[in-house]
Image: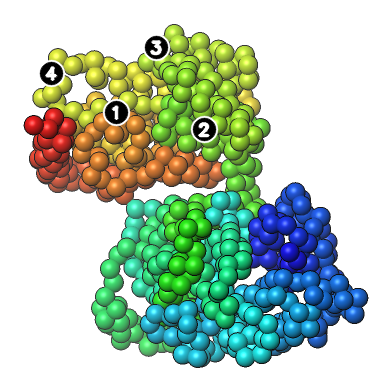
Amino acid sequence: MTYFVTGATGLIGRNLIRTLLQREGPIYALVRPGSMQKLEALRAWWGEGSERVLPLAGDLERERLGLDDAARSRLRGHVAHFFHLGALHDITDRDAEAQARTNVAGTRHAVALAAEVGAGRFHHASSCAVAGRYEGCWREDMFDEWCPSELPHVRTKHEAEAIVREECRVPFRIYRPSLVVGRSDTGEVDEIDGLYWLFGAIRALGDVFPRWLPLPAVQGGFLSVTPVDFVAAALDHLAHQDGLDARCFHLAGRDDAPLGEVLNVLARVARAPEFRLPLDPELLGHALETLRRDVPERVYRLLPPRQFLLASLLEAYGVPIELLRLADAPTRVDTHDTRKALEGSGIECPPLEHYVRHLWRYWEDRLEPDRGRERTLEEVVRDRVVLVTGASSGIGRATAIRFAAAGARTLLVARSTDKLEEVREEIETAGGVGCVYTADLADPDQVSELVARVHEEHGGVDVLINNAGRSINRSIADSVGRLHDFQRSMAINFFGPVALMIGFLPGMRERRRGHVINILSAGAQMQTPFSAAYSSSKAALDAAGNCVRAEVLDDGVHVTNIYMGLVHTPMSEHTVVFDTMKGLTPEESAELIAEVAIDKRTHESGEGVGVLLRLLWAVWPQGAGIVTRAMYHSQRELGYRLASRLAAERAPAK
């Protein structure tokens, strides 16, 4: 079977070819002469079989796509599937004529060539943008119902699809992807556009505002985001199914999300504040009107127009002003026919939150414009020694894997040799370096031996991540006769990490390079009931880290205290109350630790409530006491109820 592909070096094209190479037959790729080197560079990425990709020099803007007689003769009677993917995707007004030449005239030339060479089927990559500003649910059988738009991208995509519908003389199928982003498995993408225009602005919000501070809620319209690997897989599958000619398929997720939800998904992965604060538009309008009335006229006239301020702010972060025209899109995309045609294939569009971490990491590592200093974990820890305690499970395991993937020599420390070996094997299978060190941090002799071995075998450490901990959630009444709970908590949560700092800080100061990251808890800030042993031990390490920081900063050594909120790990699963609470995953916590390793922040709070309650303790201790007492009664009651329910569920049936 022979294939012909336009736009072969574009994001969708290169991924589709990678998928088509799993089938048999040559793949002719239309490539502009100036992009030949780009195609040749893709062969290594395509892998085995890439020699079957045969480039043909041409141009969408020329008749017959610029192919000479010899090239057309090679194609005549042999092309089973003609994929027309080539197009300009530019939502700005900068070059409307170029979009018309490529998207409209180029499609007409492609349709004519497909007929001339006798292609078996013509596959046209359109876009959900052909709906324009249609209000309501845009079905796959709709076309003429569109609501016209002033954006050249929308107009030209609609006109191009009309050409296929009206002029194509071979069997055809139309595919409308929604907003396409990088691969869901790696985040790999070509360039910054579409959703990526928002990444820099979201990052800036995270740099300015604390994560726990809610920003005004964003309403906006509906947005459907689609990873390119899903688009390629769906295109390949649908193209080879019988009985689907003259039909249109929406390559999008099952549900469109409001713009505000999409922004919050990005904010969470960027560790930025979310848009959660309800804002009454009428109240805001009244406030602005009051401001305009009360500010002296001579001052008000000096202020630039709001549109100018907004445009300047967006431009500063590389966001085109035209994006605002799409921000309130009223169209929801229906995917019923596509989902039915894909049934049984295993091909399904994943929700954005399932893969956004890959998108963000790839953008941050490869595409972020502001990379004047070390801004990626790879730049910070590649070939450096990173020691992670508690690396056998939970946060420690996820952190060790994340840092090893970034090129660090990762030293894995915990009590369980078997579990550490599993982590090491996973790291080394992925191409990283992991070393196992079994030690109980509650035993001073074992800690001393660990420090000595690491110095002998690695010359010290560059990043020390004090993660191992013991969590106890028990009332003081239930602690009678259990002083060892406090002793054990202090041994693991405080004395062990301090001993490691004492052991490794001299080498860091001598090299004038190093970073100690203490994984604390929001409990160190909040001092809540049922956590006297745990919170006091974490608070002790908090104080130690703050004291040490001032002593070593001039030597180029950083100390960061992270007040981690609830993380669902094996350590927390024994506390019944936590089952009802929303928390982070170990992988999300590892990303937070990676961010801190990059930015060298002195403190990071993963729980806004902890910050507020610590402030309350400082300015109004009586009020903090009222709050914590209320927490005690509510948690006790909830604990009783959950314990009773679990006991009933576990009771043997009569």
Instruction: For residue 502, say whether it is visible.
Output: no
Q: Quadrant of residue 427?
A: top right
What is the quadrant of residue 170 in the picture? bottom right
Image location of residue 616, percent across then percent down? 22, 46
Q: Residue furthest top?
A: 445
CA neighbours of label 2 inside 10 A, class few (<14), some (14 to 19), many (20+):
many
Left or right: residue 410 versus residue 78 is: left
Q: Which residue is mark 4?
A: 480
Three-letter residue code for mark 4: Val
Query: Hey, what amino acid is under mark 3?
Result: Asp
The numbered disc on residue 471 is 1
> Which residue does the image show at 23% across and 44% down from the upper left?
580
Label 2 – label 1 distance at C-alpha: 21 Å
- Could you tell whether 319 is left or right of 548 in the image? right
Q: From this view, report whether residue 608 is shown above or below residue 12.
A: above
The amino acid at mark 1 is: Ser
Q: Give neighbour class at mark 1: few <14, some 14-19, many 20+ (Cα, 10 Å).
A: some
Element marked by disc 1: loop
Q: Which mark is nearer the camera, 2 or 4?
A: 2
Residue type at tag 2: Ala
Q: Return the residue at label 2.
A: 400
For the N terminus, which image quadrant? bottom right
Residue 233 placement (x, y as % from top left) = 58, 60
Label 4 crowd bin: few (<14), some (14–19), many (20+), radius 10 Å: few
**CA separation, marks 3 and 4?**
24 Å
Residue named by callout 3: 443
Q: Earlier in the sequence, mark 2 or mark 4?
A: 2
